Image (cartoon, rainbow, N blue to C red):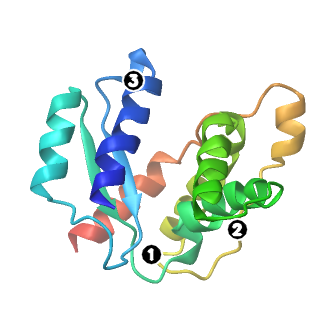
C-alpha cells in the first residue's frame, strides 16, 4: 500500500493538482484497514516532502459508511467501469483498472464528493450522529444547467454550534 501511494498516487496528485490550489492541504482519506499506511509513516512523509505539496493522510471516522467516499463512491464507480472490460488474468485486471482510473471523469468524482459533503453537513446537524437521510441536491438538473457546484456551503451558525459542542 505504501509503495502504491508513493510511486503512483503521489505522482498522480502532483501531475493533476491545480496550480491555484497548491497552498491548500490535500487530505488522503483511508479506511481503518490494518493494511493501510499509518498517518505518520516516515517513508510516506519523506515522499510527500519531495512533492512540495501539503499532503496529509487521515483515517475515516469509525462506523461511518456514508463518509467512506472511497469505498461507497469512487471505488464502486471505478469497479463498475472495469466490469465492462474482460480480464483473463491478474495483470490484465490491473491494467484495466489503471486504464479506467486514467480516463476517469473528474466531474463524476465531483458528484461523489458533493454527496460526501452533504452527508458531513447532516452529521453536524445531528450532533455527530447518523440519524439522517443522505441529502439530494438534484445534481442531474444542476449539471444540465451548468450550475453543479464544486463544493457545498455550510451555514456559519452550524459551524459555530459544532465548535462550541466540541469545546464542551
Disc assigned to residue 50: none
Up the image or down, 152 lies above or below 166; here it is above
**Quadrant where the N terminus is found in the figure:** bottom left
Distance, label 3 to label 2, CA atoms, is 29 Å
Q: Tell me if label 3 and label 2 are in contact, CB under 8 Å.
A: no
Distance, label 2 to label 1, CA atoms, is 14 Å
Q: Secondary structure at mark 1?
A: loop
Provide the residue designation for mark 2: 134
Provide the residue designation for mark 1: 128
Residue 109 image offset from top left, x and y in percent: 65, 44
Regarding residue 126, the answer to whether it shows in the image is yes
Provide the residue designation for mark 3: 21
**Sequence-first tag of 2 and 1:** 1
**Sequence-first tag of 3 and 2:** 3
Q: Which marked residue is nearer to the observer: mark 2 or mark 1? A: 2
Distance, label 1 to label 3, CA atoms, is 29 Å
Residue at x 15% of width, y 35% of height: 49
Residue 148 image offset from top left, x and y in percent: 74, 34
Up the image or down, 144 lies above or below 95; here it is above
Number of marks drawn:
3
Residue at x 41% of width, y 71% of height: 31
Neighbour class for label 3 at 10 Å: few (<14), some, many (≥20)?
A: few
Q: Quadrant of residue 69?
A: bottom right
Neighbour class for label 2 at 10 Å: few (<14), some, many (≥20)?
A: some
- The residue nearer to you, when weighing 105 against 4, is 4
- The residue nearer to you, when weighing 168 against 66, is 66
Q: Secondary structure at mark 3?
A: helix
Amino acid at each position: 500500500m505504501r509503495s502504491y501511494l508513493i510511486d503512483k498516487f503521489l505522482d498522480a496528485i502532483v501531475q493533476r493538482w491545480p496550480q491555484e490550489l497548491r497552498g491548500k492541504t490535500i487530505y488522503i482519506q483511508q479506511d481503518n484497514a490494518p493494511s493501510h499506511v499509518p498517518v505518520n509513516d516516515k517513508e510516506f512523509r519523506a515522499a510527500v516532502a519531495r512533492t512540495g505539496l501539503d499532503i496529509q493522510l487521515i483515517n475515516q471516522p469509525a462506523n461511518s459508511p456514508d463518509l467512506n467516499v472511497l469505498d461507497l463512491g469512487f471505488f464502486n464507480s471505478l469497479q463498475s467501469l472495469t466490469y465492462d472490460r474482460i480480464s483473463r488474468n491478474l495483470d490484465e485486471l490491473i491494467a484495466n483498472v489503471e486504464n479506467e482510473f486514467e480516463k476517469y471523469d473528474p466531474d463524476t468524482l465531483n458528484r461523489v464528493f458533493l454527496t460526501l459533503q452533504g452527508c458531513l453537513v447532516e452529521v453536524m446537524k445531528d450532533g455527530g450522529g447518523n440519524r439522517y437521510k443522505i441529502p439530494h441536491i438534484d445534481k442531474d438538473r444542476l449539471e444540465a444547467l451548468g450550475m453543479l457546484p464544486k463544493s457545498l456551503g455550510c451555514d456559519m451558525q452550524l459551524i459555530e454550534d459544532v465548535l462550541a459542542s466540541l469545546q464542551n
